Amino acid sequence: MAYYVVYDKLSGEIENVVECPEFLAGTIHLDENQSYLRVESQVSPQEYLIIKGSLVLKG
């Protein structure tokens, strides 16, 4: 299994954390303003943002 974060492309805010096999990652439902990124472990949306395609600790 792998972890993916679904995030808002404009704000970088993580909106969901999904656990699924890698081969199913392409089936993750995304709205028009969302994207997803694979992460090494489950992360807390309150503690992290996605900036320029990287997971960053909120400061």
Image (spheres, rainbow, N blue to C red):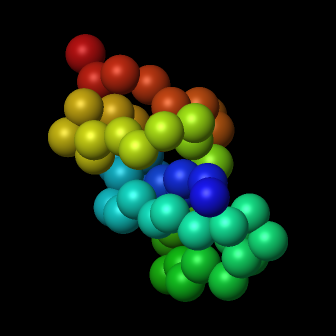
Looking at the image, which residue is at 48% across and 54% down?
Answer: 5
Image: 59 above or below 12:
above
Looking at the image, which residue is at 50% across and 31% down?
Answer: 55
Image: 4 above or below 47:
below
8 sits to left or right of 1: left
User: Picture quarter containing residue 7?
Assistant: bottom left
10 sits to left or right of 28: left
Q: Nearer the viewer, residue 29 or 13?
A: 29
- The answer to whether residue 35 is visible is no
Place of residue 49 in the rendered image (x, y in percent of width and height, measured from the top left): 38, 37
**Quadrant location of the C terminus?**
top left
Q: Nearer the viewer, residue 20 or 16?
A: 20
12 sits to left or right of 47: right
- The answer to whether residue 20 is visible is yes
Q: Residue furthest top?
A: 59
Q: Residue furthest left?
A: 46
Q: Residue furthest right?
A: 23
Q: How many marks?
A: 0
Place of residue 40 in the rendered image (x, y in percent of width and height, measured from the top left): 58, 36
Looking at the image, which residue is at 63% across and 48% down?
Answer: 38
**Quadrant location of the N terminus?**
bottom right
Place of residue 29 in the rendered image (x, y in percent of width and height, measured from the top left): 55, 83
Place of residue 8 in the rendered image (x, y in percent of width and height, measured from the top left): 43, 59
User: Picture quarter containing residue 4?
Assistant: bottom right
Image: 24 above or below 12:
below
User: Picture quarter containing residue 24?
Assistant: bottom right
Looking at the image, which residue is at 67% across and 83% down?
Answer: 27
